Amino acid sequence: MIRVRPPFPSPIYPPPLVPPSSPSFLSPSHWRLQLTFASYQRPSAEECPTSSAPRRRRLRWWRWRRRRRRRSSGSCQGQQADPFGGPPARRGAAPRGPMAMNYNAKDEVDGGPPCAPGGTAKTRRPDNTAFKQQRLPAWQPILTAGTVLPIFFIIGLIFIPIGIGIFVTSNNIREIEIDYTGTEPSSPCNKCLSPDVTPCICTINFTLEKSFEGNVFMYYGLSNFYQNHRRYVKSRDDSQLNGDSSALLNPSKECEPYRRNEDKPIAPCGAIANSMFNDTLELFLIGNDSYPMPIALKKKGIAWWTDKNVKFRNPPGGDNNLEERFKGTTKPVNWLKPVYMLDSDQDNNGFINEDFIVWMRTAALPTFRKLYRLIERKSDLHPTLPAGRYYLNITYNYPVHYFDGRKRMILSTISWMGGKNPFLGIAYIAVGSISFLLGVVLLVINHKYRNSSNTADITI
Amino acid sequence: MALCAKKRPPEEERRARANDREYNEKFQYASNCIKTSKYNILTFLPVNLFEQFQEVANTYFLFLLILQLIPQISSLSWFTTIVPLVLVLTITAVKDATDDYFRHKSDNQVNNRQSQVLINGILQQEQWMNVCVGDIIKLENNQFVAADLLLLSSSEPHGLCYIETAELDGETNMKVRQAIPITSELGDISKLAKFDGEVICEPPNNKLDKFSGTLYWKEDKFPLSNQNMLLRGCVLRNTEWCFGLVIFAGPDTKLMQNSGRTKFKRTSIDRLMNTLVLWIFGFLVCMGVILAIGNAIWEHEVGTRFQVYLPWDEAVDSAFFSGFLSFWSYIIILNTVVPISLYVSVEVIRLGHSYFINWDKKMFCMKKRTPAEARTTTLNEELGQVEYIFSDKTGTLTQNIMVFNKCSIYGRSYGDVFDVLGHKAELGEKPEPVDFSFNPLADKKFLFWDPSLLEAVKIGDPHTHEFFRLLSLCHTVMSEEKNEGELYYKAQSPDEGALVTAARNFGFVFRSRTPKTITVHEMGTAITYQLLAILDFNNIRKRMSVIVRNPEGKIRLYCKGADTILLDRLHHSTQELLNTTMDHLNEYAGEGLRTLVLAYRDLDEEYYEEWAERRLQASLAQDSREDRLASIYEEVENNMMLLGATAIEDKLQQGVPETIALLTLANIKIWVLTGDKQETAVNIGYSCKMLTDDMTEVFIVTGHTVLEVREELRKAREKMMDSSRSVGNGFTYQEKLSSSKLTSDLEAVAGEYALVINGHSLAHALEADMELEFLETACACKAVICCRVTPLQKAQVVELVKKYKKAVTLAIGDGANDVSMIKTAHIGVGISGQEGIQAVLASDYSFSQFKFLQRLLLVHGRWSYLRMCKFLCYFFYKNFAFTMVHFWFGFFCGFSAQTVYDQYFITLYNIVYTSLPVLAMGVFDQDVPEQRSMEYPKLYEPGQLNLLFNKREFFICIAQGIYTSVLMFFIPYGVFAEATRDDGTQLADYQSFAVTVATSLVIVVSVQIGLDTGYWTAINHFFIWGSLAVYFAILFAMHSNGLFDMFPNQFRFVGNAQNTLAQPTVWLTIVLTTVVCIMPVVAFRFLRLNLKPDLSDTVRYTQLVRKKQKAQHRCMRRVGRTGSRRSGYAFSHQEGFGELIMSGKNMRLSSLALSSFTTRSSSSWIESLRRKKSDSASSPSGGADKPLKG
């Protein structure tokens, strides 16, 4: 922290002992050499005879521009600086200050009134540049009625249509949400709350009133689940997840207490991985022939490309045997099976299992939904999920009722702006209207008071 | 060099034996090597770091850093703190190192200076640092004195020696020092080498004008005083050589002892800022406590049950302890409300402003080739808040150049300039000056415009001749003729010099003098007058006379003096002439000229003889010699014939009246504090338009006792009250002792008043029980002039105003006597002009002309204040907007001190993303162009009233920041809560949320700075757009695959930027946030502009409307005043060289008529001089009586 120091502590009293210039170092005189803005500075010919040619050319250009500007603006800014023919002003050629300068000066002048402290014949005349004289050309915006009011109206006129558009789009999105936490005694999943029943499968029936067109996305939603808790968020080792073999066997300390189990490193380590969502959801359409038809759920394509291809990598290993690559590690405490057995598909197994990747992308808020499966549209003719009765088959493994959490299954279509999002549309409409109203109010106020204030002559 | 650092116990007394190094070494006195540098290469790092960590802020950040190293607490990576901290420490260290380097260089330069030291009987060249106590060194003319010396002998007779002490006390006139008689004979080296006297004296101290010691030599004791000392820093003048014995060396010299730490001045904004920072820390702790309680509750209610998935840390065993840890974690992440960059930025901005002051061409003095200089960089914005200016007179308002301007000779006035039509021409439009080419001895620099005077001289008008003869004879000036015809006059006061020079140019050239003669070239012929007596000037007599015998043998007394004194002593026959001359005097005085009346008297031989005899008796008298002499003088200076009067212009500096008028319009009160006499000061007051004849009344306080002063002040107040009551302001005056109330009542007084108070009265007025009364009275007046004040009183007056008015004060002066006031005032300005550089060294700003003050205050000060205020407002705003988001997020993340943003964003937000635009605004912003702030001095008022940044403004900024932070969190929250991306995946993941909030934050604060910037130069454009560009560039770089591949654990946000920012929803959110954050601000500002515009807004608006409006130039002419002021003649010098001349003591032996040398008178002169010196030194009141140079 720079507190500028008080003027040089000690020497200051009379000049011989002090650089007369300078209390604080920040005081310009010392910096003069170092800190000047090079392009504005006139180079002293003695100092750099060889290298200064191109720079001088640039300077000449600057000055020419400056002169032109000055001439064209016809401003009357005091005396003109010495044009460029004059002897090169030696600015700060020596760190002016040390007392020797004074001594010399005095000796030369001998009795005559000294020019100035430390002043010698050297000119320390400031350059007449627009920059140094604070006359840089500038745009000075003022909030006049002519600029402000239109802005308010324009914002209003743009925001309201956008808001309506978003709102309509959002309303056209089909979405159904099914809570299967099972805390209510009537719920079919109630039985699964007790840890004794394993595996516990429960079934929930539901009906789609309208058919879902286009691709349908299946989410699981969790509430009151603090994926954004600091200790939770940091409890992972990205090196390990990226396939780093040393991190695989020696996970980061951040993973504690899920770093090692029975003297073996856990892969993947950490609380996030350990708490991975492991319910299995299956969807069946109850057709007219009362024979339930399973809906094809696509497992792949639910994670970000960068996550799947860059961020998450399986540990290296010669052969395709994933188990071999994870040798020496153990599964997370809560998991039923090790990481290399998440899926049979080689491309969706281990760290690059997409369910795992999705889980590892922690949520920002304690209530969140994560993409579970895709239901792809098969043809243009038939809706992906026709209206009708369905049932959801849940293999209930994941307890949330300890901490009042809730679990949901969500089916949703999407639009250009994602899933259902009523907030954005309403917000846009509201802000647009407020802006428009504000514009009107300001217009009235401006109209009423303008004559009395702004155009009034300045009175001092 | 190592010697320099040696520490010694404090001395009781000092013993030094000449030519005996062995003996002196026992005492281990400091050598003559000085060290002002603080570090060397080895000690630099530890010492500098130690110093830096003494700063509270640095320690605070170090503390944060340590907190971050505790894993249970660390909510941020260590580098978020260490990067800025290291940056700041490095910058400061580099700065300190450069600083110290320059000090080393200057130390070396001084220490290696050569001097001649007498070693083993031979003069040897030695470096200054090798000079030891007890050495005898030889000094030559114009050399600097190397150490504090006891003068042993010199080339001049009687061991006299002349020095200039400009570097010590700022006075440029020469001073005399004398060796004690016993040593003054030690002229040559062989004698000196045998000299083995021992000096026992006081220990080193910082009293420049005192020294007491004793010389023991040959079993004899000789007392020593300051009169025998040559102090380090003086320059030897007019003395070929001298020898001195080193008594104090290096750090022990009086010069070095005086160089204490300068008081560190802080601006009021600084103080306010510090208070606010403390408040913010309080606020920070409050937030920490709230969140910690929240954390304890959360962990108790939810966290315990959530342990299935997120067990507690091992060390944490209860919700309470978790809350405690969370408190510290939140302190870490919320510390950015007071970022380290605040202090750095403030310094950078001030530095920039200082540069602008240094670079200002309009504050560059062509004549002296001196630019303005901001010597401290910490006070710039205070320049925009000045309410009181305390100004010195001589050298500040005036040039301290006396010009022979007009004269009245035998009833005719010369010197007025008439133009072709016969009208009195205005000053400043003078035609050709008078041609003095007939006179080869004329001074080329002397200018006079009235040719009729020269004609009168040329036709041989006897009165005119007598007039100039008087001027060429009656003075104590010394002449020096370096080459034939090249005359230099050395005058005690500039007045005298001006008069003698005038006579010289008009053909009466004072050529040379001996103790008994004066040689004058009268119209080309050399005439030698026999000098019979000099009746010297003193304060009471206010006149001086010479008695001369002309070649014809006639004895005549010539006298010049103050009109008030002299007019009583004229012969009654001159009544008619007297009246005309009086008219002229009035006229001159009315123009602010210093006048002087000239008269002569013929004495017959017998009378003179008799008088001379009595004078001799009187001068030999043991008791009350002065009084007797005075009455003898009085006797002869009587019945004189009036010759005429002179008028000397005490030249005002250029543009002084205009500047004062402008500053007064800007509501700045100007007080003149001068050591000059009341008459002179009042005159100057009139000529620089501080006092005008339009003023209702000018109160003059001259009381000598407490009661008188109190009475006079009371009367003045009553008068002011009376008149304002009669004006009908409708308030009744009540006798109230409660000061503030009274003051405010008094300040509403109608009519313009001025107060003139002199030193005696001021001494009483400044006593504790009266100071308030005095202050009230003075503050009610438009102008205040304090005359004949001592330097200490100057400082006291400033202190008084500082203490009770809570206003920003500025002191401006040029001399050593202004130093105390310059150091006391909030802002000290030094005029780098005539009187040495003492004031400049003590000052915070320096320039060479008083008129630059208006630019410094109205332009630079105003802008600085405006910029600093805008900067601070914005800075607090942006950091609250940035930091408070964490607070809101706390409620949604279990109060776990999880940050909203990426840690890199937190590190870089203050030092990269948002620093430059606000710096550019802080450095370059302008509301109205410079000409306007001169045209409308009222624009200065917001600064004085502290309107632009105060606690209220601060809370508004904070509120705006909090408002922004709320929106910044809750709008994305609302959007993200249930949203999904356009590919169906989750949108509300932590990383996307972080990027969205960060991006909208950067955009919102950039738009806000855009709104705040009133002056968009190319640099502002570059910084604002550049910052945004850099934000996105860094964002994408940080989220790139490459960095992740290298450090997977550090760059976890891989791929996030491109994934998130490709979402239309995210952009819609950003736009929405920006509009909602900015819209109210725009509406509010627009309304304020519409309904309650500031003057600066109006000026800006008008400028926009009437772009082509021509600048109205205020032109203030210097109009001749036809007032009724009487001027008094004031010699501004002390009792002069009269006695010295008559004794012949100061004459070179070569030029001295040896015959007329009388030992008696000479010793009496020295004694009296000595006595006077010791008198004035010992009596404390002596200082107050002595006229000081204004």
Image (spheres, grey):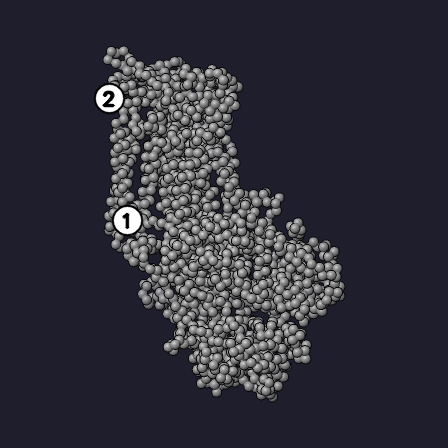
- Quarter of the image for residue A284 reads top left
Residue B47 lies in what quarter of the image? top right
- Residue type of the residue flagged with mark 2: Lys
Give SS at disc 2.
Answer: loop
The x and y percentages for residue B107 are: 61, 53
Q: Name the residue under label 1.
A: A145
* Mark 2: few/some/many CA within 10 Å (<14, 14-19, 20+): few
Give me the residue at 60% from left, 72% from top. B483
Above-or-below relation of B990 to B1186: above
Tell me the number on the disc at residue A210: 2
Residues at marks 1 and 2, CA–CA distance in whole angstroms? 51 Å
Horizontal side, residue B773 vs residue B1074: left or right: right
Please state which of residues B634 and A441 is positioned toward the viewer in this rendering: A441
Q: Is residue B498 above or below residue A18?
A: below
Residue B553 in view of the camera: yes
Residue A80 at x, y percent in the picture: 43, 59
Q: How crowded is mark 1: few (under 14 residues within 10 Å), some or many (20 or more)?
A: some
